[in-house]
Image (cartoon, rainbow, N blue to C red):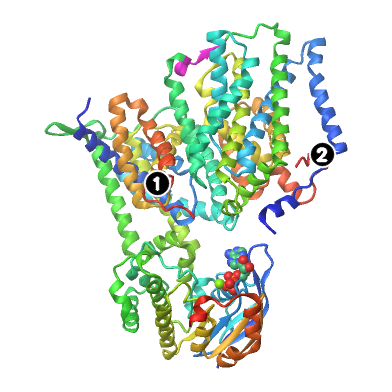
Amino acid sequence: MTLLDQIRIATPHRLETRSLILLSLALVLFLLPLLQVVSDGYNYVLHVLMVIFMYIAMASGWNIIGGYAGYTSLGHPVFFALGAYFSGVLLVYRGWSPFWTAPIAGLVATLFGFAFGLVALRTRGPAFVISTIALLLLAQLILDNWEWVGGSNGLSLPMIGWPYRFYKIPFYYGMLLTALLAIWVSYRIRHSKLGLFLRAIAMDETKAEVAGIDTRMCKVIAFAISAFFAGVCGALWGYQQTYLRPTIFLTIGAAADLVLINLVGGRGTVAGPVLGAALRVGLDELVVNQVGSTELNITVTGLLMVLIVLFFPGGIVGALRERRHLPRLLDWD
Amino acid sequence: MLILEIEEVSAGYGMGPDILSRVSVRFEAGLIHCLIGPNGAGKSTLLRVIAGLLRPRSGRVLLEGKVISGLRPDQILAHGICLVPQDRSLFPDMTVRENLLMGGYIERDQRQVSRRMEEVLEIFPEVRRHLNHRAGTLSGGEQQMVAIARGLMVHPRVMMLDEPSLGLAPLVVDRIFEAISRLKTMGITVLIVEQNVRKGLAYADRGYVLDMGRLSFEGPAREVMEDPRLQELYLGRMVLSNREVQG
Amino acid sequence: MTSGLQILILGLALGGVYALMAIGLSLTYGVMRILNLAHAAFMVLGAYLAYWALQILHIDPLVSILINGPLFFILGIVLYRILFVPLAGRSRYTEATLLLSFGLALGIEGIMGAMWTGIYRLANPSYATRSLVFGSFYIPEGQMYATAASLGILIALWGFLQKTRLGRAIRATMQNRTAAQIVGVHVERISALAFGLGMASAGVSGSLLSFLFPFFPGKHWQWISILLSLVVLGGMGSLIGTVVGALMLAVASVYVSSALGPTWSPATFYAALFLVLMIRPQGLFGKREV
Ligand SMILES: Nc1ncnc2c1ncn2[C@@H]1O[C@H](COP(=O)(O)OP(=O)(O)O)[C@@H](O)[C@H]1O
Ligand SMILES: [Mg+2]
């Protein structure tokens, strides 16, 4: 039995009542902003959900290269910043709304990811993660010193012209659509030939190569696709924040978030990043915003990462599946 | 006298299937034993189990009646069992001298190691002129010699050689086998795995045929050579290698 | 604009220190394929210890090398046993080690931030502000001591690896792990030793860092990417390569710094990294992985 056959057999393909439940959940999320239209007071809920959607989109995107192919990227904040600055600059200098430049920002990120991937993914192994750290720090350096986009002071963006009561709603929908698209793409890739090849690469790249897979191209394409979602999210998030600063996007901490979300949820699974994102934002709202953020937050992130790598390398989805306790509702692979 | 006993050993890699299934073999002290069998039969795996590089899933390995399976590779080496693996496993960026010194690694006393190196160089004088060359730059035959010499550094009682003739020209093969005979005269028990069946059995005292993870049959080398089952095994599965047809 | 020879002098002096900083990364990767992303975090931790040793106990940073070395060596062995040994035998081991050490780096960064806040520190021993002038050339005195200390330590390490039984075992394990097992090297013990040595080098580098470069907790990310860049240039797992890579990139960065301003000197390393990956991904002294 070849490596590919083994993976194929391990991949059941089903969609029934579970998809009904999930679709109705999506429907509820689509209708939720009506509450805010009918009576004010739900902006906070919309905001939190919007942040969750954003993390879902980015983490699901990250998972395509980081999970399926097993290549950890710490460079995704760069795509986020690229999207934010691309749309932000067009807004400031041209007055074009990020709501329609966001997809273009995503494509720019994709293109850049493709080009960078061609260089960074030539080899097997850890050179990739090293180059993504370098990319992040280089981008920091450039944005800090590039006065046209505001340098380290950043760039103020005009506010969206909507009344305060409704201004979260377009961002909410923007992020929701991006998140759904990300999940859909992630699912489709998982069940495509590309997904099969990527998982073969994660398992044993040498064998995958011997089996005739163009491993480099697969990795580069996966990386480029995964960059798209960070780019779109960046464009929307920047507009929502009304200012852009290198330090709010471009930190290793932001990269660590994406890694941790995937590790917690279960990297390499479709549901993992979704679950991880919801947990990450939920806990942040419940705990950190109550206790207040300290220098030790980052320590907690780090310790969690260590513990998960040591004891739950499969994350929640992986651990449940191993014990055969994974509810069908969460089994999206 | 028996020196090494393999009792009902099963072994495999990772979560994979058993590569060896309940193999039992006994080896006599002071003889040359030749293990033959088709590719993938599990010959190298058996040597790895004996050397402690792979834990058996069940069964035991005994050296002069004492159980040694389960010990670490360095402990088994200290009992006098050494392995010269299929790829020779030299340290390519070290000089031959350093490779020999590494051969004596388990001896802490550096003077003992130097003395032993002199002895080994007496036995294999052809290694001496390469002492300061990087091992990676030597020819296949020279590397094999160095690998055997390195194995001798620990005063082994049992020496296992995995396909020592692999990839070597026929003349060089003869030199290697001649060196292996020298091991026997030193009282070392030798286990060779050989694809070059005729040559291997010609130098050996006893032959063992391993097939699909089981011991298929064994006997005095000459008898094994003539055994019709051997012809069947090889002609049925694989064409005799060119080398063998020539040799 | 500084003269070419002056740039070379400063660059090589700096390169000697970078070589010491990076040698441990190279050693741990070479011996056991651990990519220790926390290496520079430990280095910055070492710098804090040296800084406080000077402030409170009036121990010169050059003397604190003698404290940091053994301290981080022991810490390394303990961490290796607790954190990395359980990962042994995992498929995709290197990936697991880099995630683990990434978490470790974040953890240390947070703790340093909580203990010592985010402000920049720089230890200030008497020689830190002086310069030695030779004719038309100069070299900062602190830099000279740091380079001398680095070279001394590197030579000692080289001697240990070349001339002693354990050192040879480390090199043997780097070259062929199975072969090392075959000749009776207890590779787990050697790995712990190598990890300890790697950490010790981070600790002593921290002592030098403390008076050479301003530091704060988050600074280690810049350091790790600089160090990894030069390790990749030299060829991952090649100790000679690391030293050569350090010298080359240090000279280049001093040049860039004098031509474009010090802001851009880290960019030298990143640009070199991307260039290496484009032209010769296995680095100068690396072997192409099969
Ligand atoms: N390191 C390994 N991991 C997994 N399988 C292995 C490994 N080494 C050998 N095998 C498998 O074990 C079987 C027997 O191999 P081996 O003992 O090398 O056979 P032989 O030496 O008789 O040719 C083969 O099917 C081979 O694929
Ligand atoms: Mg074999």
Which of the chains bears the disc numbered 1?
C
Which residues fall within the magenta stretch? Answer: A149-157
Residue drawn at the location 69% of the way across and 7% of the way down:
A162
Position above or below: A254 against B169: above
Of helix, strand and loop, which one carries label 1?
A: loop
Marks 2 and 1: same chain?
no
- Label 1, ligand 1: CB separation under 8 Å: no
Residue B65 in view, yes or no: no
Position above or below: A238 against B44: above
A233 or B86: nearer the viewer: B86
Look at mark 1 in the image and give the residue it sits on.
C283
The three-letter code of the residue at mark 1 reads: Gly
Residue drawn at the location 47% of the way across and 76% of the way down:
B164
Residue drawn at the location 25% of the way across and 45% of the way down:
C148
Decide: few, some or many residues near mark 1? Use Cα within 10 Å; few <14, some 14-19, many ≥20: many
Query: Mark 2–mark 1 contact, CB under 8 Å?
Result: no
C247 or C121: nearer the viewer: C247
> How far across and down, in percent of the image, does residue C246 sit?
33, 43
> How far across and down, in percent of the image, does residue C26 sit?
41, 50
Look at mark 2 in the image and give the residue it sits on.
A329
Specify whether residue A152 is painted magenta.
yes
Residue drawn at the location 56% of the way across and 46% of the way down:
C100
Mark 2 vs mark 1: give the one in front: 1
**Quadrant assignment for the N terminus of chain B:** bottom right
> How far across and down, in percent of the image, does residue C62 sit?
29, 43
